[in-house]
Structures are given as C-alpha cells and as structure tokens.
Image (cartoon, rainbow, N blue to C red):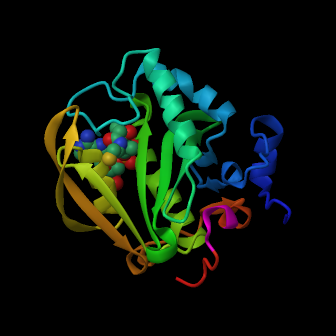
C-alpha cells in the first residue's frame, strides 16, 4: 500500500485530534484558508454531536427532506444521525459512494459536507449535501465548504460535472450554487416532511468549475482513496 500523503497542516492536526485510519476515505482532507473538511471518523462525529443535539433544522422553511432524521427530538436525533452516517460510509461501490466530511473551523466542528458519486466511473458525476449549525451560518462558510468539496471532486477525483438540488425556498443553498457558477438544470418535486415541495436543480460542468477554480485549496489523502472508490484515471475525464 502506498504511503499516506500527509500535508504539513494535516500532520500538525493529526498529532492533536485526527487519528490516521487504515480505511483511506476517512483520511481524505481538504483545506481552505478558512476551514477544513476532514473525513468523518467516529471521533469527529462524536465532537459534532453537541451541534446536532442543539438542533440543525430548527425553523421553517425546512431546508431538506430528511432521511437522516435531523427533525427528530434529541436523543433519537443523534442516534439516527449516527446510524445514517455509519450506514452511508459502509455503502461503497462503482454505482454509489458517499464521502462524509466534518467541517472544522478554528479547530471546532461546525457542520458536515458530503460528496456523493453516482455511477461515477461511467459519468464522472457528483452531487453534494451539506449543513452547518445555525450559529455558523451566514458567514460565507457554506460557500467555502462547497468550493472545497468541488475542488476534491474535480481536481482530486477528475469529476466531469457536479449537481445540486435545493427546495426553491432554501435561499442560502440556491445562492451558493448560483454564486459558484452552477447553471439552472430544471426543477423537480420531492417530499419534505411528508408534503410535496418543489426543488431547483443545478449543474456545474468541469469547464464552468475551471473558470472559477481556486489555487489556495489543498487536498490530502486523495491518491490512497482512489482505488477504494474505483477511480482508475482521475486525469482522464
Ligand atoms: C445551506 C448552508 C450550508 C449555506 O451556508 P451559509 O454559511 O449559511 O451560506 P453563506 O454564508 O456561505 O452564503 C452564501 C451566499 O448565500 C447568501 N445567503 C445566505 N443565507 C441566505 C438567506 N437566508 N437568504 C438569501 N441569501 C442568503 C449569502 O449572502 C451568500 O451570498 P454571497 O456569496 O453573494 O455573499 C447553510 O445555510 C445551512 O446549513 N442551511 C441549513 C441546511 C441546508 O439548507 N442544507 C442544504 C440542503 S440542500
């Protein structure tokens, strides 16, 4: 097995709070000047539990439909959320994978950013899902963590396009997509807490991402993760 690529910044964090796992997806890291996405190990999930316990989806309009049960009352909320992440982490194949990242700002976990591949080996397509604790919103972190996930997808994994969906009244999520150059890609319907609600669909091609790509985002642990996800030629797109 090749040696793990460890960035200096990652090595410094490893000494204090991040355990290097024998499972490569948990070692993937993305660093921007403002935040880090760290593979969601059980230690990091535990550190994020207080944010989930305080509440993630607390006011209408409800931000997402919720297979992760973030609308439940505590402590069922934390239990169901942990089970959903554990189950999602364990489902990895050519047709589907989902990488869960804890968003860390100034050493504190503040939310999650997921990167999901669907038939990635055939289409090079990813989608994203994210949330921040209410206290962390409205400071540009949502935009920054989406950029971090896109950098991993396009630069690290060789993605061809990224998609995003958000309910039409989820202004923050729709605004992040628009601001990062995604183009409208139609609409759809989904259930939201049992009610029908309309979604905006967004799509960002590799060319559109390249036009606004950043040069201050660092990736770590990517090469070791590629075989786990069945990605053979990330430069081939
Ligand atoms: C979606 C979410 C991750 C965005 O993160 P955020 O840190 O709040 O967003 P940012 O501060 O980066 O804002 C991004 C842009 O949206 C705008 N924005 C943020 N909240 C807004 C709101 N309620 N109404 C209108 N615009 C808003 C900001 O002005 C900013 O615009 P700019 O880039 O032109 O300055 C966060 O709001 C959140 O966790 N929401 C609840 C969960 C959720 O909706 N997840 C997504 C499911 S699809």
Q: Residue at x 52, y 44 (%)?
A: 88
Q: Is residue 70 left or right of residue 65?
A: right
Whereabouts is ligand 1, in terms of quadrant? top left
Front-most of residues 129 and 96:
96
Q: Residue at x 47, y 76 (%)?
A: 122
Front-most of residues 20 and 191:
191
Quadrant in the rendering for residue 196: top left
**Is 216 rendered above or below residue 38?**
below
- Residue 129 seen from this side: yes
Front-most of residues 92 and 212:
92
- Farthest residue to the bottom: give it: 236
Q: Residue at x 80, y 35 (%)?
A: 16
User: Dominant secondary structure of the magenta stretch?
Assistant: helix
- Residue 101 seen from this side: no
Q: Position of residue 235 (x, y in %)?
A: 60, 82
**Is 203 rendered above or below residue 71?**
below
Q: Which residues are magenta?
A: 227-231
Q: Position of residue 26 (x, y in %)?
A: 68, 48
Q: Is residue 79 left or right of residue 39?
A: left
Front-most of residues 155 and 178:
155
Q: Position of residue 69 (x, y in %)?
A: 38, 29
Q: Quadrant of the N terminus?
A: bottom right
Please check the rendered image and state whether residue 118 is part of the magenta-colored stretch, yes or no. Answer: no
Q: Residue at x 75, y 35 (%)?
A: 17
Q: Position of residue 190 (x, y in %)?
A: 20, 46
Please check the rendered image and state whether residue 228 is part of the magenta-colored stretch, yes or no. Answer: yes
**Is 135 rendered above or below residue 234?**
above
């Amino acid at each position: 097995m090749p040696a793990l690529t460890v960035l200096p910044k990652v090595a410094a964090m490893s000494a204090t709070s991040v355990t290097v796992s024998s499972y490569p997806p948990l070692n993937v890291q993305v660093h921007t000047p403002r935040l880090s996405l760290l593979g969601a190990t059980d230690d990091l999930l535990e550190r994020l539990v207080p944010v989930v316990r305080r509440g993630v989806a607390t006011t209408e309009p409800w931000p997402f439909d919720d297979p992760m049960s973030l609308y439940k009352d505590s402590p069922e909320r934390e239990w169901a959320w942990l089970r959903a992440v554990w189950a999602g982490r364990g489902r990895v194949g050519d047709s589907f994978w989902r990488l869960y990242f804890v968003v860390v700002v100034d050493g504190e976990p503040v939310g999650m950013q997921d990167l999901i591949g669907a038939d990635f080996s055939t289409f090079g397509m990813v989608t994203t899902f994210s949330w921040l604790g209410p206290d962390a919103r409205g400071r540009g972190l949502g935009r920054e963590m989406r950029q971090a996930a896109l950098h991993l997808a396009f630069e690290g994994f060789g993605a061809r396009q990224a998609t995003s969906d958000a309910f039409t009244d989820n202004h923050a999520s729709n605004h992040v997509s628009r601001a990062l150059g995604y183009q409208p890609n139609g609409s759809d319907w989904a259930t939201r807490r049992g009610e029908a609600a309309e979604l905006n669909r967004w799509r960002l091609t590799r060319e559109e991402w390249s036009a606004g790509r950043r040069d201050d985002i660092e990736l770590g642990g990517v090469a070791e993760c590629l075989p786990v996800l069945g990605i053979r030629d990330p430069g081939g797109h």
